[in-house]
Image (cartoon, rainbow, N blue to C red):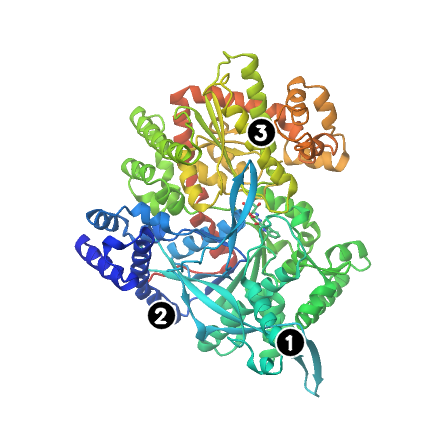
Amino acid sequence: MFRDKETFKNAFLEKMQAVCGKCLDEATAFDKYMALGGMIRDYTSRKWVKTNARYLEEDAKQVYYFSLEFLLGRLLGSNLLNLGLTPVCREALDDLGIDLNELEDAEADAGLGNGGLGRLAACFLDSMASLGIPGHGCGIRYRYGFFEQRIVDGYQVELPDNWLRDGNVWELRKPDKAVEVRFYGAVREESSSERTVFVHENYQAVLAVPYDTPVIGYGNNTVNTLRLWSAEAVQTDFDFSSFSHGDYLQAVEYKYSVEAISQILYPDDNHYKGRELRLKQQYFFVSAGIQSIVRTFRKKNGSLKQLPEKVAIHVNDTHPVLAIPELMRILIDEEGIGWDEAWEITTGTISYTNHTILAEAMEKWPKDLFRNLLPRIYMIIHEINERFCRELWDRYPGDWDMISSMAIIADNHIKMAHLAVAGSCSINGVARIHTDILKRQEMKNFYIVYPHKFNNKTNGVTHRRWLMKANPELAGLITEAIGPGWIREPAELTGLLKYSADPSFREQAAGVKKRNKAVLAGMIRDKYSFDVDLDSIFDVQVKRLHAYKRQILNVLHIMDLYNRLLENPNLDMAPRTFIFGAKAAPSYYQAKTTIKLINTLAHIINNDRRVGDRIKVVFLENYRVSLAEMIFPAADVSEQISTAGKEASGTGNMKFMLNGAITIGTMDGANIEIYEKVGPENIFTFGLTAEEVMDYYRSGGYSSRDLYENDSRLRLTLDSLVNGFFPVPADEFRNIYNSLMVHNDEFFVLGDFAAYTAAQLNLDRAFRDKAKWLEMSINNIAYAGTFSSDRTILEYAKDIWGARQLSVE
Ligand code: N85
C-alpha cells in the first residue's frame, strides 16, 4: 500500500489536510505527527480486523495480560519499525523537507507505569504480537500518567503528566463495549430449595469504557489489542432527576468521584499503601476486563466449562488478583455454576507473576475497608479462605503455625499474594535467584503444599525497541556482519562472537558507540550547558530511586574518587562521566534527599577546576522511556548494584548489555544469569552474596560503625555528608548519614564499599585497554539474545498459558 515513496507522500499530504485542515507550510511538527500517526493507524486497521477474524475462525486460545501498568513510551517509531515502513517513510518525508525524528519527538510518552513492572508488560505486548501469539493487554487508561520530574535547585519537583491533552492518535474509543462495575452497597441472600442467590443492592454503578490501541507485530500482519478502561458516570451528563430535587452538588460529586478512578497512576514503586482509591482502580479494571472476556467467549462458545481451554488470564503482580474472586462471582452469580466447578474453571484459567520480595510491597487490604467497598467480592474471598484453610487442616492437622502463616484473611487483612497462589495454576518469579528465594523463603509453605505451581521465567526486553529502534546504527552493523537472522531469532546474536576479536569490526563498533555518545552529549550540552568528554567512560545508573538499588553506593564511590583526585592530581585513571536518571516517589523522603545529594555533588565536581575534565556528574531530568532510548546506546558501563537478594530481576541490565555496555554489578537478580552467559571475563561483579546478606539479617553481626572506624577513606566520604562540606543547610543529608551510621545500614552499602571501589579500579584498567574493552563489549551483545522478551514469552506460552503461535495472512 505504501511501499513506494510517491504513494506515501501523497497519502501523507492528503491526511495532513484531512486531519489538520492545513497545508504543509502552516503545519506544526505536532500536526505532522498527528497526520502520520493517523495514516499509520488507518493502514493498521485492516490487519487488526483480519487478525481478530482469524482468531475467531481458528478458535485460538487467547491470552489476556492484566496489568495496572503499561509503560509504553512512544508508539510512532516502533509501529513504523514493526510495519517495515521506516525507510519509505523517512525517504518520503525527506522529500517534503520533514525530519521524521522531529515528528517522533512531538509524540508524548505513554507513561502509564512506574518502572520495571510496567515496562515489562509493554515489552511482553510487543513480543506476543511479533511471535503471532493471540495475547492482549488489559489495564487502565489513566488521564494522568507517571509524573513529570523537574529539578529545581537540585530538588525533585513533580508536575502532572497531561499526556492526553492534545489527543491520542493510536486509541479507539469503543462505547458499545462499555460495561458496568459496581461498588459499595449490600448483598441480600435469597434462598430457594435449589440454591441461594446473592443480590447486590444499593450499589454505586460506574461505567467502564474501553479504549483499544493496536499492538503491531514485527513483519507478520498480526495486530493484537491493548484495551485500557476509562471510568465514567453512568449518566453521561448530570443526573437531572436529582438536580431537579435540588441535589445539584450530589450529582456533581458523584460524577467527579467516579472519574477519579481512572484519573491518576499511583507513583509508588515497590511500595504498597492501603488507599481505597487504589483498591477501586484494581477492581474497576479487573471487573471490566473479566466481564468483557466472558462476553466475547460466550459469543463463540456455549458453556463456560471450556474457559481454561480457550482463555488464559495472567495477572501482573498482585494488583489484578481480584480477577480470581471476580471470575468466581460471574460464574456463580451470573452463570449459575456451582462452587466446585467454578473454582476449577477459575484456577485453571488464572496465572500469576511475583515481581518483588520486599515486605513493604506486599499488598494487604484492611478487611473492613474491603468489605465496605466490595461486599460480594469479600464474601467470595471469605469462602475461598474457609475452604483453603480446611484443605490445609486436612493435610496438616494441628499445624496452626503453618495454616495461619498461609491464610488469605488474617490479622484483619486480606493478603493478596496468598489469594494469588491459592487461586491460580501457576506462580512464577522473574529471575532464577528470585524464584529460588520465593520457594525457599518468602513462599516456603506454599511451595511445600503446591510445588507444581512454582516456576521461573527470567525476564527479557524487546530487542526491537531497545536495539533496532534505539540503536539503528548498531543494528545495521550487526546485520552486516552476521546477516538479519538475529532479528527473528535473537539467540543468533552469538554469531557475533567470532567478530569480537576482529580489529575492523571492533573499530566499527567503537565508531557507533562514539556517535551515540555524541548524540547524548549534544543533548546534555543543549539542556544543561556543559560539555562532557566523548572519550570518558559513560558510567550510567538509570532506574527508580530506591534505597535497595543503592544509588548511594555509586555516590560514595564518586566522592571517594574525587577525594583521591584532590590528593593526587596525577592519579592514573580514565576520565569518567557519571550519569544518573531516576524518579523518586513523591512521598519517599530519603529518595528525594538522594536526588538533592547527587545534584549537589554534581555542582561541586563539575565546577572544580582542580579535577578539570577528569570527572563529571550529570543528573538527567525526567527519566522515561524515550530518554532511555537515547541513554542505553551511549553507555559504556551499566551500574546494577542492588543489595544481593533484593532486585527480583532488573531489566535495564539487559537493555545496557544489548547495546554493548559492560555491567558492574552484584550477584543479584538477572545479573547472575548475565554473569553465567558472558563469563567472569566480560563483567565486573562484586560484593556480598544473597546468602551472606540473609545470614546477617538472621544472625546479626553486621556493624556499619566498625566498617566506618576501620576504613579511613570511607570515614572521609561519610563525614562529608554532615560536616559542612556541601553548601546546603547543616542537616540536609543527615537522614542519609543516619540510615548508614545510626540505623546500621539496612542495605549493606558500607559492607560492599571496599569491594565496589576495587571492582571500579579493575573496570578502569580494562577500559584503558581499548582492544580488550571492545572485545568485552561485543561479547556482551553476542550473549544478549537470551534476554530478548521473545524467549521469555515463548516460555510463558508453552509452560503456563498453553497458547500457540498463529500466522495471519
Ligand atoms: N518491580 C516493580 O517494578 N514493581 C512495581 O512497579 C511496583 C510494585 C508495587 C507495589 C520490578 C505496590 C504498588 C505499586 C507497585 C522489580 O523491582 C524488578 O527487579 N509498583 C523487575 O525486573 C521488574 O519488576 C520486572 O519484573
Q: Which of marks 3 and 2 is nearer the N terminus?
A: 2
Q: Which of marks 1 and 2 is nearer the N terminus?
A: 2
The nearer-to-camera label among 1 and 2 is: 1
| C-alpha span from label 3 to label 2 | 55 Å
Q: Is residue 81 above or below residue 549?
A: below
CB atoms of marks 3 and 1 within 8 Å? no
Residue 682 or residue 509, whichever sits in front: 509
Q: Where does the image place residue 357, in percent across and percent down from the top left?
A: 64, 47
The quadrant in which the N terminus is found is bottom left
Q: Where does the image place residue 699, in percent across and percent down from the top left?
A: 77, 35
Q: In this view, does 320 lie above or below 81?
A: below
Residue 33 or residue 268, whichever sits in front: 33
Do we see residue 431 in this rendering? no
| C-alpha span from label 1 to label 2 | 37 Å
Q: Earlier in the sequence, mark 3 or mark 1?
A: 1
Q: Residue furthest left?
A: 6
Q: Which residue is drawn at 43% across and 37% down?
A: 631
Q: Which residue was labeled with disc 1?
A: 203
Residue 195 located left or right of residue 584 = right
Identify the amino acid type marked 2: Ala
CB atoms of marks 1 and 2 within 8 Å? no
CB atoms of marks 3 and 2 within 8 Å? no
Q: Which residue was labeled with disc 3?
A: 555
